Amino acid sequence: MHILHPPQWSPPIGYANGIMVPADQIAFIAGQVGWNEQQVFASEDLIPQFEQALKNVLAVLAQGGGRPEHICRMTAYCCDKPQYLAARPQLGKIWRALMGKHFPAMSMIFVSDLLDHPAKIELEATAVIPAAP
């Protein structure tokens, strides 16, 4: 995996501007919200929903033999910008606990609503999983 970053640019914080990878196996992870395996929300709060949504992304990825460091791109859709901004320190701790210091190319999009009520955040990802030797 090669991080794409023009040398004259300031470093991004918590994401990569671009990533280039050899195309072995590509996994496309559909939008995951913060519900459990039975599609039940344990909380209506953003922070626990973010943690569960990220765990859900990683669970789907694991089914293809992928690990967090294989994620190349992630898009987050969130319904509450002020709540998200206030929660960034806690969300960062969750990120590091589940993803380590791996920061894929990311986009954050604020939306008026998500399909699955009472979802506050939805995460989708693309990963490149190296072929088995």
Image (spheres, helix red, strand yellow):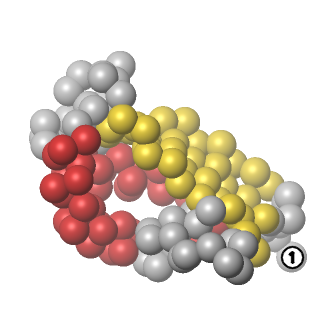
What secondary structure is marked by label 1? loop
Image point (39%, 53%), residue name:
54
Q: Relative to 59, is 27 on the left or the right? A: right
**Residue furthest front as drawn:** 8
Residue type of the residue flagged with mark 1: Pro
Q: Relative to 24, is 45 on the left or the right? A: left
The quadrant holding residue 70 is: bottom right
Image point (86%, 65%), residue name:
22
Q: Relative to 55, is 49 on the left or the right? A: left
Q: Relative to 107, is 133 on the left or the right? A: right
Q: Is residue 51 visible?
A: yes
Q: Nearer the viewer, residue 68 or 133?
A: 68
Please provide percent x and percent y for residue 68: 54, 67
The quadrant holding residue 79 is: top left
Q: Is residue 98 above or below residue 60?
A: below
Image quadrant in which the N terminus is located: bottom right
The quadrant holding residue 77 is: top left
Q: Is residue 2 above or below residue 22?
A: below
Q: Is residue 36 visible?
A: no
- How many numbered marks are there? 1
Image point (44%, 46%), residue name:
108
Please provide percent x and percent y for residue 16: 58, 66
Q: Nearer the viewer, residue 7 or 70?
A: 7
Please provide percent x and percent y for residue 82: 18, 44
Q: Nearer the viewer, residue 20 or 37?
A: 20
In the rendered image, which residue does mark 1 sit on?
133
Image quadrant in which the C terminus is located: bottom right
Please provide percent x and percent y for residue 52: 30, 50
10 Å crowding of disc 1: few (<14), some (14-19), many (20+): few
Q: Nearer the viewer, residue 14 or 21?
A: 14
